[in-house]
Image (cartoon, rainbow, N blue to C red):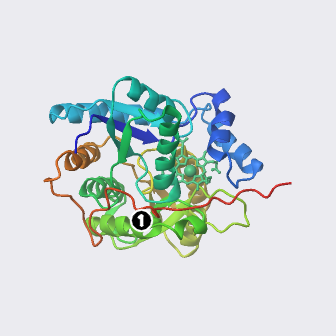
Amino acid sequence: MKYDALLVQSFGGPEGPDEVIPFLENVLRGRNVPRERLLEVAEHYQHFGGVSPINQQNRDLIAALKVELQTHGIDLPVYWGNRNWTPYLADTLAQMEADGVQHALVFVTSVFSSYSGCRQYREDIAKAQAEIGPGAPRCDKIRTYYNHPGFIETMTACVQESLDQIPAERRAAAELVFTAHSIPIGMSDNCNYVKQLNESCRLVSEATGHANWRLVYQSRSGPPTQPWLEPDVCDVIRELAASGAKDVIVSPIGFISDHMEVLFDLDTEAKDTAAEVGLNFIRSGTAGVRPRFIQMIRELIEERLNPETPKQALGTFGPSHDFCPSDCCLYAPQRPRPG
Ligand SMILES: CC1=C(CCC(=O)O)c2cc3nc(cc4[nH]c(cc5[nH]c(cc1n2)c(C)c5CCC(=O)O)c(CCC(=O)O)c4C)C(CCC(=O)O)=C3C
Ligand SMILES: [Fe+2]
């Protein structure tokens, strides 16, 4: 296949106090999330000066990726477009069209497949293409990478660094807690989110040789009446303390960088909860710009540029599809009742 650009597609975040509410209104437009939740999350952002680190993290990722592509002789311009904040995807796609891009590969910053992390990004592209019209660049999403050795090795290194911080005599008993963004049950029923997460966690724990692990969820949103994936990380921290645990390692395997969901929900809330119940809390790293992760993105690009390239995957499920089937990650978000 001939591709002439790479698009990095991400979530976006505010970069100043005045941007927080308009950003959150973008995120939650048409979603079934109470206004009180929006205002509560606004406080999380204001706590950090109204700046989410996610945009800078994406700038850093793109800078590292450009070097990686250049040193491997891959001559693709790299673009960046977000769902919820500048640079907005629609503006980026218009720029790509103006630059003569015809067919782009797309790297999405969500690892695991759900409506939020897969289909919604493809819908965002379709919407932006419709705005531009028939001349809009075609866009093909790169396959999901939850079981790619580049992701598993990166997360394994992060967890190993955390294990190494625990005194040897306590290490085997340490609780390894992987976290991912909670999603509504109605969303998780239509995708492989939980199955993929369990596989990644299993692969990382096997690679570290640390068998004492569990998968939990964080950052629940939505109305209390709507079921979301559980248990919540803070509830689990309390239960672990009550059952006599001394050390907990929290690995945010569901995210690729230390953005606001990590800084607030883990490094603030979960950490405070652990302190309250007397548990030693170690927050494990995310992929960020670790070289093996950047290398993985380049390998995923190479396998699409040259179909002879073997597709790497660990574990039992094999490499994921290159092209999403029509029912991939379907979800009809529940709308607030009118009136
Ligand atoms: C699966 C998933 C990921 C992981 C995959 C991935 O990494 O993409 C993720 C990532 C992120 N979620 C983020 C922020 C937010 N998510 C929200 C709300 C929601 N997330 C959902 C799902 C996910 N979200 C869902 C089902 C909702 C309910 C509304 C809806 O149906 O869409 C809200 C609204 C307020 C609230 O209720 O929390 C905010 C502010 C940020 C940016 C952080 C920053 O600014 O640094 C990131 C990377
Ligand atoms: Fe989210």
Query: Which residue is label 1 attached to?
Result: 197
Please give the name of the residue rendered at 51% of the width and 51% of the height, measured from the top-left corner: 120
Find residue 100 and report its horizontal and vertical position in percent: 33, 26
Q: Name the residue type under label 1.
A: Leu
Find residue 206 and report its horizontal and vertical position in percent: 28, 69
Please give the name of the residue rendered at 34% of the width and 57% of the height, measured from the top-left corner: 159
Secondary structure category for the residue under label 1 = helix
- Locate the N terminus and report the quarter of the image it occupies: top left
Of residue 45 and residue 167, the one placed in the foreground of this image is 45
Find residue 162 and report its horizontal and vertical position in percent: 36, 55
Please give the name of the residue rendered at 48% of the width and 44% of the height, measured from the top-left corner: 126
Residue 301 appears in which quarter of the rendering? top left
Q: Is residue 96 above or below residue 192?
A: above
Of residue 134 and residue 326, the one placed in the foreground of this image is 134
Please give the name of the residue rendered at 62% of the width and 58% of the height, measured from the top-left corner: 220
Of residue 264 and residue 143, the one placed in the foreground of this image is 143
Q: Residues within 10 Å of mark 1 (few under 14, many from 20)?
A: many
Residue 259 in view, yes or no: no
Residue 165 appears in which quarter of the rendering? bottom left
- Locate the C terminus and report the quarter of the image it occupies: bottom right
1 sits to left or right of 200: left
